[in-house]
Image (spheres, rainbow, N blue to C red):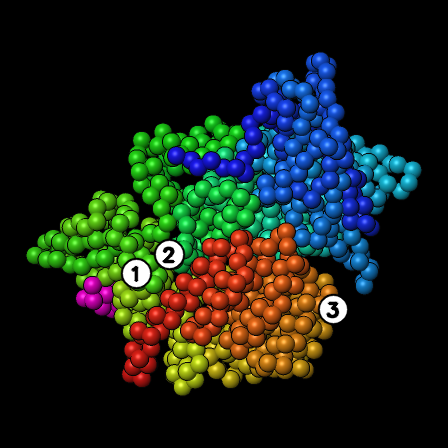
Amino acid sequence: MKRKNLYLLPESAEPEHYKISLSPDLEKFTFLGFEIVTVDILKPTKKITFHAVDLEIKNSSLVYADQSGGVGFGQKQISYNKRFETVTLESAKTLKPGKAFLNINFEGELNDQMHGFYRTWYELEKGKKTWGAATQFESTDARRCFPCWDEPAKKATFELGITVPKDYTVIFNIDPEKIENLDNGYKHVSFPKTPKMSTYLVAIIVAHLKCIDGKDKNGVAHRVWAIPGKEEHGKFALACSIASVEFYEKKTGISYKSITTDSPKLDMIACPDFASGAMENLGAITYRETAALIDPKNDTAAAKERVAEVVMHENAHMWFGDLVTMKWWNGLWLNEGFATFMSHCAMHDKFPEWDIWTGFVAGDFRSALHLDSLKNSHPIEIYVKSPCEIREIFDDITYAKGSVVNRMAEQYLGEDFWKGLAIYLKRFSYKNADTVDLWQALEKASGKPVRDIMARYTKQSGYPVVKVKTIASNGIVTKIGLSQERFLADGSRDEETQWVVPINVLTQKETTNLEPLSEKNKDFTILGKPEWFKLNSGQSGFYRVAYSDELWNGLVEAVNRGELSNADRIGLLDDSMALAKAGYMKTSQALDMIAAQQYDKEFDGNVWSVLISNLNTINHILDNDEKWKEELASFARKMLRPAFEKLGWSKLPDEKHTNTLLRSAVIRNLGEYGDASMVLESQICFGSSGANLDADLKSVIYSLVAQNGGQTEFDALLKIYDETNDAREKERIQSAISCFKSEEMIKKVIDFSLSERVRKQDWFRIMVMLGYNPKARLIAWNFLKENWNDFHKKYEGNLSLLVRTLKGVTSGFTDEKNLSDIKKFFKAHPLKEAKRTMKQVVETIETNIKWRNRSLEKIKNWLANR
Ligand SMILES: [Zn+2]
């Protein structure tokens, strides 16, 4: 049974169309608004309630469409509810059911919180700030711009008229139909009616913008908009946009043109101030500059991958989210899980050489496994009510685990998956759907019990660990015993929860699909007596596998001989480290698996990124133990040096995408693990080339220079920072300076992060990076604590960036003293936006402490015997 959600609006009236007029004042940072909402009054009522926050309603009236009367609402009849963010208009007489026009005059603020209708600045002339405005409405902030029924299921059409200074460009979800010049240096821009859509997808951007454009094969214009001078940097995004729209059209059978029938176009707008990565407003997608633009001077493999992923993710939303929208926010994964999964399909199609699916296993798949192994995780489908609760589920469970569930369904159903999706999209076009609607469509297309298997992954927290051992073999067949239980990172047990686990067995010869494991324990028979076997071939299922010692040793040897695929090696590396932490395996066995990769002369970038991550996990819990840290560093150098010998400092013509990415990671980690030649070479390159370095190496060179530098390097880096107007180069330097080691420099970095030179959208990154730096962690934490009230005030209204900062700064601690300090602070400063995050931080630190206490001596023994 669904609990009653008091945050839902009463069902007495429903919007059908909004005609909105806005006049933003870009000097006073306010705006005036007027709207006529066509509403259906559904039952006799005296009250009409809708959403509005930080808006002042000046006056309001209602007239019936059939001209059968109306009513005015004076100030006394308008009441505000702060908790529910609503306004209620109360009439003296009962309003009868029927269609009516609700007229509302209102005023609001162009805030500096990067949500609602907010102000943003840029420089058209060096050193001179110019102000513009943009919107960010997801999840619940359209109500900060105009009074509305701000729920995803209350779909309506929208029309906009807006008055702005003549030299500004205005972008809306649809192209303008009329621009009238006014006498006072202003113009009035009118936009026709949008398709039917949810309020959170409306977008309005007012700024000095220029664009580049192109057309897809249906003739739809795709445009990338940016501050003048940067528009050419949108070329790569433009190509990704066109390619992905064409790919989704092929896969879904629905053209983008048909979604936005009246005036099809796809605008991408790079905004100088933007809180997240991008936002999928229908036909007017907004981006952080670094997610859409690539300055040719800073064109790197990593930048390309980032831009392709974000653009293709946002474009997938035009189908998954914009055309078919979740009924309520508990279905958010239907948006984000699909957009994440589909973007990987599109990337694989456009850039097959990127090996994106192995990257998925090393990336989203692992992130999902890690977060979902906490007791304080949450099910994909979780019933959220308040705006704070909604904001908290924009996390790796919704995005990454959601995409893993889609990938599982696709692998299980094959072509039927795509047929089912077409049914689902068609049936719910311009409407709202629930998860169960998706399962039904997939069942209809495939005739398979999709809901039975999948619902366990969406309705329950966590995932299983499958324990496997050999029972007996006569040489012709081998009997193996499997059992499942929930995997928890700290090793605690939950015997109750169960899954239907898809099982396949990989041997030297082949992959065989077995029956799913639907009971707690079950024996299976496999053919022959394989030398070794691995469950979950290709890491297609969302679970971990714990092998008996004998089977594990066989796998280590198979890896040594180079007999496993890259995705399977990633699975073994990641599972073993997590299982060791939780006490299912010995930490020495996880270390053996790292060492077993030495045979690899290919140095696959994805496998090695996970290997490096495992080394860093061990390094992290050795913390202040300098002697043993050095022992580990010596092992790490021995592992990484051959990779460097192969890759070298210079990019080869036509080299593999993943090799380019790996080069930076290897050099960075060799440098951090004490290979003096990497540091020296970085210092020499930086000294002679400064900002003109090979772009792919800039990030690692800047960081190694900072790590081993002081005031001189700080000044040199900030000189580059001040001279560039490329957001990516600025980001790089923000990350690099967070690597300084001395207390004096770290304090200077904190001061810098608070200066005018760092936008609000970037402050949190510097703090999070300081949290990763063992020398800076405590200083950053003390600073955050001491100034908590100021930060709270500064970010009030949009605390998501502060919550991310809090998590980044605190999660890295591994000692009792800081843990108890953090717990005390959390208790004294409860924050409803960070309720789950705070619990996750504490659980993560406790797990690490427990693991260290249990394994430290064994790690030392293993290292001593290398
Ligand atoms: Zn998304």
**Element under label 1?**
loop
Give the extent of the magenta segment: 548-557
Examine the rendering and report whether any part of residue 180 can be seen: yes
Amino acid type at mark 2: Lys
Q: Which residue is mark 2?
A: 375
- Using the image as rendered, state which of residue 532 and residue 575 is in the foreground: 575
Q: Which residue is mark 3?
A: 723
- Distance of mark 1 from mark 2, alpha carbons? 9 Å
For residue 521, side relative to residue 399 (left or right): left
Magenta stretch holds residue 551 = yes
- Using the image as rendered, state which of residue 249 and residue 768 is in the foreground: 768
Examine the rendering and report whether any part of residue 403 can be seen: no
**Element under label 3?**
helix
Amino acid type at mark 3: Glu
Residue positioned 53% across, 29% down in the render: 431
* Quadrant (top left, top right, bottom left, bottom right) of the C terminus: bottom left
- Distance of mark 1 from mark 3, alpha carbons? 53 Å
Circles 1 and 2: CB atoms closer than 8 Å: yes
The numbered mark, 2 or 3, whose residue comes first in the sequence reads 2
Q: Is mark 3 within 8 Å of ligand 1?
A: no
Mark 2 closeness class: few <14, some 14–19, many ≥20 residues within 10 Å: some
Say if 412 sits above or below 479 in the image: above
Circles 1 and 3: CB atoms closer than 8 Å: no
Indicate the quadrant where residue 174 lies. top right
Closer to the eye: label 1 or 3: 1
Magenta stretch holds residue 41 = no
Q: Position of residue 63 (x, y in %)?
A: 72, 20
Say if 536 sits above or below 790 in the image: above
Q: Which residue is mark 1?
A: 492
Q: Position of residue 284 (x, y in %)?
A: 65, 41
